[in-house]
Amino acid sequence: MHGPPRRISLDPARARPRGDALTARMIAALSERVGQPLAPATVTVDGSTRLEVEAAAADGSVFAQVIPHAGAFTSAHRNRVTANLFKLVWVATALFPDAQVALCVTPSVGPALAPHGWVRVAAQELGVRLLVFDPGSDSLRPAEEVLW
């Protein structure tokens, strides 16, 4: 984007994302994986445009979105995956170009990340790490290692 420099701030989340214990466990696993604490945050651009991220490092070096879900997969989950990917790509491309970005899902959301589907391929090519959280062990695995 060309034009005057943007004013970008990163602050603790103004409103906590709707979450539960599973969301907190996913963020804790991501924090352990990247070796620094992650917490919900608000990014403000030019003093007026705000977006919430579910997990961010205080220094803006890591951003992640999590999709905790148990039960049947629906098209709403696919839509949430693509919306979160778009948000992460914008953050990493336009706002924090040196940041690492990741999308973390539970296994029931896996069909949105089918191995040869456009969503997975696009995420990989755009630098978004895809991780699957195992609620039974609180562990993370790269999506490439999980078969759906």
Image (spheres, grey):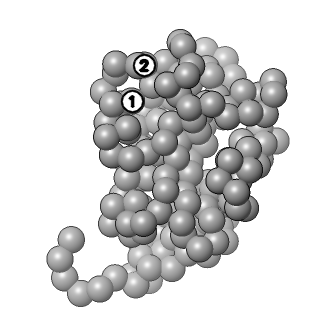
Q: Are marks 2 and 1 in contact (CB under 8 Å)?
A: yes
Q: Which mark is residue 120?
A: 1
Helix, strand or loop at label 1? It is: helix
Residue type of the residue flagged with mark 2: Ala
Which residue: 50% across, 36% down? 130
Q: Nearer the viewer, residue 117 or 77?
A: 117
Q: Label 2 to label 1, Cα distance in Å? A: 7 Å
Quarter of the image that includes the N terminus:
bottom left
Q: Please, is residue 55 above or below residue 127 in the view?
A: below
Q: Which mark is residue 109?
A: none
Residue 112: percent from left, percent from top = 45, 24
Residue 71 shown left or right of residue 116 in the figure: right
Provide residue 41's location: percent of width, then percent of height: 62, 65
> At x 31% / y 40%, what residue is drawn?
125
Q: Residues within 10 Å of mark 2 (few under 14, many from 20)?
A: some
Which mark is drawn over residue 114?
A: 2
**Of the pair 71 and 31, the residue shown nearer to us:** 31
| Mark 2 element type | loop
